[in-house]
Amino acid sequence: MGVINTTPDSFADGGTLYHSARLDLDLAMARARDMVDAGAAILDIGGESTRPGAAAVSPGEEMDRVLPLVERIAAELDVIVSVDTSSPGLMAAAAGAGAGLLNDVRALGREGALAAAAATGLPICLMHMRGEPATMQQAPSYTDVVAEVADFLRDRIAACAGAGIDQQRLVLDPGFGFGKTVQHNLQLLQGLPRLAGLGLPLLVGLSRKSLIQKLIGRPVEERLPASLALAVLAVERGAAIVRTHDVAATADAVAMWTALKEEGEL
Ligand code: 9MG
């Protein structure tokens, strides 16, 4: 899953698709095409930054950023278009624009989101987050982070069932970096097989995240090698989908692991 942020303030690639303070749709399409050529099966389009402390965006502005790109990608490229949103209005509009997946970092927790997502008939990624992006990194605390994330995801699967969303439509994500310390992230990475035991595909997003800075001191523009190491570890532990800013390199890293596995060398 390649990441395309239409925000001017994303932590990892903020503003790189902007010209004179406006989103450049042709540039975004070129990025999308490159990612598909590099092997992305899914492109995740986001219109609101979820980095800690990011400014909130109105639902109207989020739609204006995301929908034109969703429409063009769906019309021109052979790829599943995922829309990264918690907004019920955008979920409905995205389905009409050709989206094939909803990615909600709030796991359909916003008022109206369960019903809106259910009505689209689309697959949905339910991600765990403790708190809200503005404050989530202020002393997050768990007794057993893997068990608590698993309990949360089980509760959201049940809420989806109550809203008429079949389990077969769901993908689960532990939400690396969303209300977690480095230690919590490492425990989740180690505990991925337990989350895979919930029986649904796992999505992981570790690409360029700040745990890399905290563990080995790399600024965001130097986090590719460490992101690749984390991607391979996550796949080895059961991840089915890797969310990444660097599709070509990630596809190669995972292909190498797969080749070794198939040769019986791992
Ligand atoms: C939008 N977004 C940013 N990081 C993410 C992650 O780790 N997982 C998912 N599902 N979405 C994310």
Image: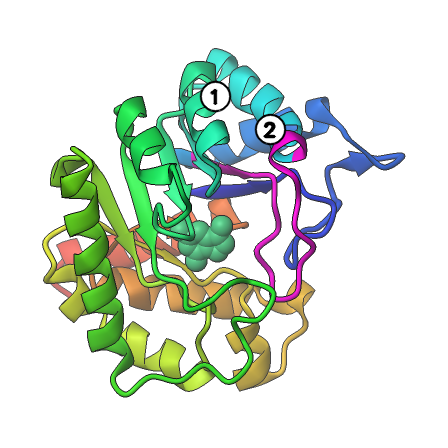
**Whole-Å distance between the Cαs marked 1 and 2?**
8 Å
Secondary structure category for the residue under label 2: helix
Identify the mark nearer the N-term, 1 or 2. Answer: 2
Q: Residues within 10 Å of mark 2 (few under 14, many from 20)?
A: many
Q: Amino acid at mark 2?
A: Met
Q: What quarter of the picture does the C terminus occupy? A: bottom left
**In the image, 3: left or right of 198?**
right
Q: Is residue 243 visible?
A: no
Read off the residue under disc 1: 93
Q: Reply above or below: 160 against 249.
A: above
Is residue 11 rendered magenta in the image?
no
**Camera-side residue of 182 and 235:** 182
Q: Quarter-wise, where is residue 81 in the image?
A: top left
For this orientation, the residue located farthest to the front is 111
Number of labelled discs?
A: 2
Q: Quarter-wise, where is residue 170 in the image?
A: top left
Q: Reply above or below: 14 against 118.
A: below
The tag on residue 248 is none
Q: Amino acid at mark 1?
A: Ala
In x, y percent, where is residue 230?
40, 68
Q: Main secondary structure of the magenta part?
A: loop
In x, y percent, where is residue 181?
46, 82
In x, y percent, where is residue 259?
23, 53
Secondary structure category for the residue under label 1: helix
For this orientation, the residue located farthest to the right is 20
Whether pointer 1 and pointer 2 mark residues with C-beta atoms closer than 8 Å, the reply is yes
Residue at (50, 70) in percent of width and height = 226
Is residue 53 rendered magenta in the image?
yes
Which range is magenta?
43-61
Q: Residues within 10 Å of mark 1 (few under 14, many from 20)?
A: some
Read off the residue under disc 2: 63
In x, y percent, where is residue 58?
65, 39
